[in-house]
């Protein structure tokens, strides 16, 4: 691995050993949170309180994570002598490692103190130790494995980042990166929508009037472009660049890279938006009449067909974290769907007016929505509350891998960034871009693993440079922009073997392999039961039957009924006690006869 | 203004020549791998299914004897050689790798009942119902390799005639003595024609004997008076005796925890005991549906194999109440003897149908040389399987074993009987004076008495 880069022997071996430890960790699997299940299977009631959301969620909120980074104020407190500075650096480094380790730990471990079974406790403690070791190894290996540095845009003095135009940025960057900024004007067949393959190497563009094209972004040459002479509303790549689906006027079609039509998916109807769930090999679509379809593209089976019944929907977006498909509706509702239930998992009213765009943060707990009510809202998906409301329209939204948010309306795009100086999560303006000649933007999408934002607009498509948006280090086993044909074939087999069943789509994907929390039923006290009976709301009935006196009597009857049950219980207990007392007074030989007599 | 963007040159991430390995770049960030737990679960499920697909434990039968096989012995200094003795007095040495007879030891007039090999692997001791103990020379391992002219026969070094028929023999793990079981327990030396010591406790026949692997002077025997007895050669007297409700057919000591032994009992169960605390079994291993005839521990001490009169071979965890694995074929009859191979990867069974059978200890293990990448893959699959084994689907697939109909039916019947007995006892208890019928645990209730 990386032979060319680490010439020195010592370094290379270090990389290999780290690598092995990490793969071992992968072998053990990452299921901190499923350990709860182990307890329950063994029949040990977990005496701790149910884990808090922070425990369950592998991604700690940035506020908490930031506690580990030294704050600037702490730095300034130290006198600027040389020795102290070096101490500070060491401190800095270890803190840095802590933050990195946190990332690989995937949440906190279970509370072993609560366990009574010593054997199980020992086993889990060993496993815990292993997790810790592998997280540490992974964090330390970062230094060697993740060599590419992420992009940045830093103002000096009174400069503001959003004042930098694309022209000035292009002049600063290297020649290879300059190629990433281009404009392709195709005035006849627009407006265009775009899609990237997961490695970011290929781009699929679809013109509304029937132009479909795949472009290799390394060579900047079209792989294939052809016309279907029909309205194309949306197009997405399937699991690799060889196949893509296009939502056309009447039906959805699947084409291969050569432009050959492979399948016509008639069941979907006149589809407006398409999304592909790449872990599940499901193609999801929402059509004109608001029906949501899921089709397994490996078997061709329709997995789900649900009527959303929430009004017209023009927005369909996949949450990459848990593969839940979200649609935005004309009533301002946003609904989240899984392929195996006919009702939405979540239905939330986000806007006072039609929803125009939805986007998800790659870590899965931020959602951005935009509506016709001139608002862009950022939601926390753990609490379903608004974190921030920004003014303005957005026809399309996109989150980058590093968490930048792009929103565009008309011919104007703005890119927002969380301010990292404070611990706040607020998105502030980072960059802006205006299309030339007033081209109307149809779709924007960040290109994975590159600092690039792709824009599909009314007369063509273009891409601009957004420093700091992409993940700098790719993983060859996840998505490799430099994939060879052989690697692609191997990956296809591997991914097919790991194809997930549709049931595995759920709001919290870390719940796989755990048990439902068994809530212990507490015995109701008499007072509580009476209080509950008093609070029962009485239904409004026909004339004369809801008189206050009648309502009061009804309530009183309910209370009496509840009380009676308790009285009976108490009497039963008393009787039993009495009998036991009687029996134990007699000599052993006579005791059996007492019970017989009693009967 | 400072601007930096991600810039990758293709040279850095692709190989230079076609002979090079493809360059790999890693990023272990959990955010890049979505739904990793679901993916792992699917992998665990697939691994469990593949396990079932590849579960082909039977390697081959070793044909040659003309009567039922009564006993076997493995050579402690040679992995491939296994001895077997049959009811017609024939003793054979088998080469496990080629599954052929290497040599034969003619001489016994009646059934061979016991076989054992000395610690250095040079001398084979056999005993039988013809009241003789015979010592044989074992060919060197190089001799086994080269002897293509099979069925060479050997003459015995010595043959000692004694008063009674023998039922079993076992050699010390370190030392020159061996013990025979018959009307009494006799301790022999290689060079003496008469036993150097004899033990007797009660009048019944001793049917099996086994030396302790840790302490060479301690041995355990089981007798037809339903007893398990522990002897100490240093004191020249029996140490302890345990009487159970049913006869123990065979005993095996755990080689890694030498204070523990497991007894194969007539009542279809195996009982693991701590030799220092005989009043209660450490574990009861249930699953056989007929008498357990023989038992042998894996050299790892984590598992043992049992052969039963119900025509099956089972593998148990040393602390598991139920078997991990069951092996059976249509042609295999009553199993009289079983052995774990010295490398813990094979199991050999000898049965009534005159054949020895060779099985894999792990049914779906891949045999042969495994490449490092393959081995890593196997380890990964094992790890994910282990992690998700509690989930119902994975558990169901991993637990499922196809049973022959008679054994399945017999198992059902036994369960029904056990339930009925329990119900009856519960009713009796309910109708008798409180405290007059104390509950007795399964680990205790087959034990009648312990005598010091």
Image (tube, rainbow, N blue to C red):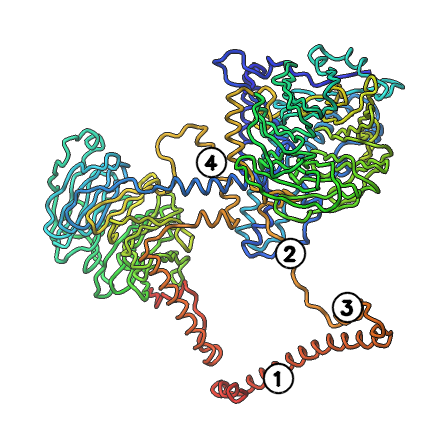
Q: How crowded is mark 3: few (under 14 residues within 10 Å), some or many (20 or more)?
A: few
> Do marks 2 and 1 share a subunit?
yes
> Distance from label 3 to label 4 (Cα)?
57 Å
Q: Does the CB distance between marks 3 and 4 fall below 8 Å? A: no
- What residue lies at 70% left-to-right and 41% top-to-bottom? A289
- What residue lies at 70% left-to-right and 45% top-to-bottom? A308
Query: Disc 2 or 3, which lies upstream in sequence?
Result: 2
> Distance from label 1 to label 3 (Cα)?
32 Å
Nearer the observer: mark 4 or 1; the answer is 4
Q: In the rendered image, which residue does mark 2 sit on? A: A47
> Do marks 3 and 4 share a subunit?
no
- What residue lies at 23% left-to-right and 59% top-to-bottom? B206
Q: In the rendered image, which residue does mark 1 sit on? A: A578
> Distance from label 2 to label 3 (Cα)?
28 Å
Which numbered dot is residue A532? 3
> Do marks 2 and 4 share a subunit?
no
B362, above or below A12, in the image: below
Q: Does the CB distance between marks 2 and 3 fall below 8 Å? A: no
Query: Looking at the figure, which quarter contains the N terminus of chain A?
Result: top right
Nearer the observer: mark 2 or 3; the answer is 3
Q: In the rendered image, which residue does mark 4 sit on? A: B379
């Amino acid at each position: 691995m990386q032979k060319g880069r680490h010439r020195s022997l010592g370094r290379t071996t270090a990389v290999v050993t780290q690598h092995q430890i990490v793969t071992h960790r992968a072998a053990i699997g990452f299921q901190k949170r499923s350990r709860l299940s182990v307890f329950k299977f063994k029949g040990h009631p977990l005496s701790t309180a149910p884990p808090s959301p922070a425990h369950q969620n592998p991604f700690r909120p940035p506020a908490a994570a930031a506690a580990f980074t030294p704050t600037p104020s702490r730095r300034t407190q130290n006198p600027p002598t040389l020795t102290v500075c070096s101490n500070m650096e060491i401190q800095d480094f270890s803190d840095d490692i802590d933050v990195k380790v946190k990332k690989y730990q995937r949440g906190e471990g279970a509370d072993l103190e609560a366990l009574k079974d010593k054997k199980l406790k020992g086993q889990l403690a060993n496993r815990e130790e292993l997790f810790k070791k592998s997280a540490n190894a992974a964090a330390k290996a970062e230094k060697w494995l993740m060599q590419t540095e992420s992009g940045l845009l830093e103002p000096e003095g009174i400069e503001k980042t959003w004042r930098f135009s694309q022209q000035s940025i292009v002049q600063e960057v290297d020649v290879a990166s300059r190629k990433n900024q281009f404009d392709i004007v195709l005035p006849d067949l627009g407006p265009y929508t775009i899609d990237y393959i997961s490695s970011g190497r290929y781009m699929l563009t679809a013109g509304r009037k029937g132009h479909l094209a795949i472009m290799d972004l390394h060579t900047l040459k079209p792989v294939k472009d052809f016309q279907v002479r029909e309205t194309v509303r949306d197009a997405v790549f399937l699991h690799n660049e060889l196949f893509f689906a296009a939502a056309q006027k009447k039906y959805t079609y699947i084409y291969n890279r050569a432009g050959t039509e492979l399948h016509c998916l008639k069941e979907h109807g006149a589809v407006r938006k398409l999304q592909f769930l790449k872990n599940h090999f499901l193609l999801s679509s929402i059509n004109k009449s608001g029906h949501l379809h899921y089709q397994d593209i490996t078997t061709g089976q329709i997995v789900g067909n649900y009527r959303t019944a929430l009004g017209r929907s023009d927005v369909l977006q996949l949450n990459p974290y848990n593969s839940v498909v979200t649609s935005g509706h004309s009533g301002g509702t946003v609904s989240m769907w899984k392929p195996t239930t006919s009702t939405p998992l979540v239905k939330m009213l986000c806007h006072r007016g039609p929803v125009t765009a939805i986007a998800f943060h790659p870590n899965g707990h931020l959602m951005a929505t935009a509506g016709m009510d001139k608002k862009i809202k950022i939601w926390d998906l753990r609490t379903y509350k608004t974190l921030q409301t920004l003014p303005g329209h957005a026809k399309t939204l996109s989150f980058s891998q590093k968490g930048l948010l792009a929103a565009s309306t008309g011919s104007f795009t703005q890119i927002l960034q969380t301010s990292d100086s404070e611990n706040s999560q607020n998105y502030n303006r980072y960059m802006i871009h205006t299309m030339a000649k007033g081209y109307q933007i149809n779709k924007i999408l960040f290109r994975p693993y590159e600092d690039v934002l792709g824009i599909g607009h009314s007369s063509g498509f273009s891409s601009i440079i957004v420093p700091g948006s992409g993940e700098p280090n790719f993983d060859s086993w996840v998505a490799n922009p430099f994939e060879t044909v052989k690697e692609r074939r191997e990956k296809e087999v591997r991914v097919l073997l790991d194809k997930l069943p549709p049931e595995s789509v759920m709001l919290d994907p870390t719940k796989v392999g755990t048990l439902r929390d068994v809530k212990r039923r507490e015995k109701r006290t008499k007072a509580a039961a009476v209080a509950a009976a008093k609070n029962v709301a009485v239904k409004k009935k026909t004339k004369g039957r809801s008189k206050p006196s009648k309502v009061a009597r009804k309530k009183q009857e309910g209370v009496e009924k509840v009380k009676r049950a308790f009285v009976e219980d108490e009497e039963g207990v008393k009787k039993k006690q009495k009998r036991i007392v009687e029996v134990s007074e007699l000599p052993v030989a006579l005791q059996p006869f007492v019970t017989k007599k009693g009967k | 203004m400072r601007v930096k963007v991600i810039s990758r040159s293709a040279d850095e991430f692709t190989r230079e020549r076609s002979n090079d390995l493809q360059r790999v770049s890693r990023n272990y960030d959990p955010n890049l791998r979505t739904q990793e737990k679901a993916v792992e679960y699917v992998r665990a499920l697939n691994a469990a299914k593949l396990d079932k697909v590849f579960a082909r434990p039977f390697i081959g039968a070793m044909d040659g004897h003309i009567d039922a096989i009564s006993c076997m012995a493995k050579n402690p200094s040679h992995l491939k050689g296994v001895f077997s003795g049959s009811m017609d007095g024939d003793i054979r040495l088998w080469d496990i790798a080629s599954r052929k007879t290497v040599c034969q030891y003619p001489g016994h007039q009646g059934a061979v009942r016991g076989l054992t090999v000395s610690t250095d692997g040079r001398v084979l001791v056999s005993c039988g119902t013809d009241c003789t103990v015979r010592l044989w020379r074992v060919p060197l391992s190089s001799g086994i390799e080269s002897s293509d002219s099979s069925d060479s026969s050997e003459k015995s070094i010595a043959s000692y005639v004694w008063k009674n028929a023998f039922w079993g023999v076992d050699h010390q793990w370190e030392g020159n003595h061996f013990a025979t079981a018959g009307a009494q327990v006799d301790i022999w030396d290689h060079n003496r024609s008469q036993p150097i010591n004899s033990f007797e406790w009660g009048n019944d026949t001793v049917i099996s004997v086994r030396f302790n692997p840790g302490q060479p002077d301690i041995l355990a025997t089981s007798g037809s008076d339903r007893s398990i007895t522990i002897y100490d050669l240093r004191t020249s007297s029996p140490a302890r005796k345990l009487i159970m409700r049913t006869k123990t057919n065979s005993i095996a000591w755990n080689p890694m925890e030498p204070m523990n032994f497991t007894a194969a009992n007539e009542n279809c169960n195996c009982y693991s005991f701590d030799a220092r605390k005989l009043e209660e079994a450490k574990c009861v291993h249930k699953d056989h549906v007929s008498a357990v005839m023989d038992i042998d521990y894996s050299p790892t001490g984590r598992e043992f194999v049992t052969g039963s009169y119900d025509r099956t071979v089972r593998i148990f965890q040393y602390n598991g109440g139920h078997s991990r694995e069951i092996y059976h074929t249509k042609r295999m009859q009553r199993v009289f003897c079983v052995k774990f191979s010295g490398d813990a990867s094979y199991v050999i069974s000898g049965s009534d149908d005159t054949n020895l059978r060779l099985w894999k200890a792990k049914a779906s293990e891949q045999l042969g040389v495994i490449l490092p990448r393959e081995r890593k893959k196997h380890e990964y699959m094992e790890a994910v399987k282990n992690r998700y084994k509690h989930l119902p689907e994975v558990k169901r697939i991993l637990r499922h074993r196809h049973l022959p109909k008679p054994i399945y039916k017999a198992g059902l019947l036994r369960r029904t009987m056990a339930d009925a007995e329990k119900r009856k006892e519960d009713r009796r208890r309910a109708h008798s004076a409180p405290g007059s019928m104390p509950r007795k645990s399964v680990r205790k209730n087959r034990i009648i008495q312990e005598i010091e």
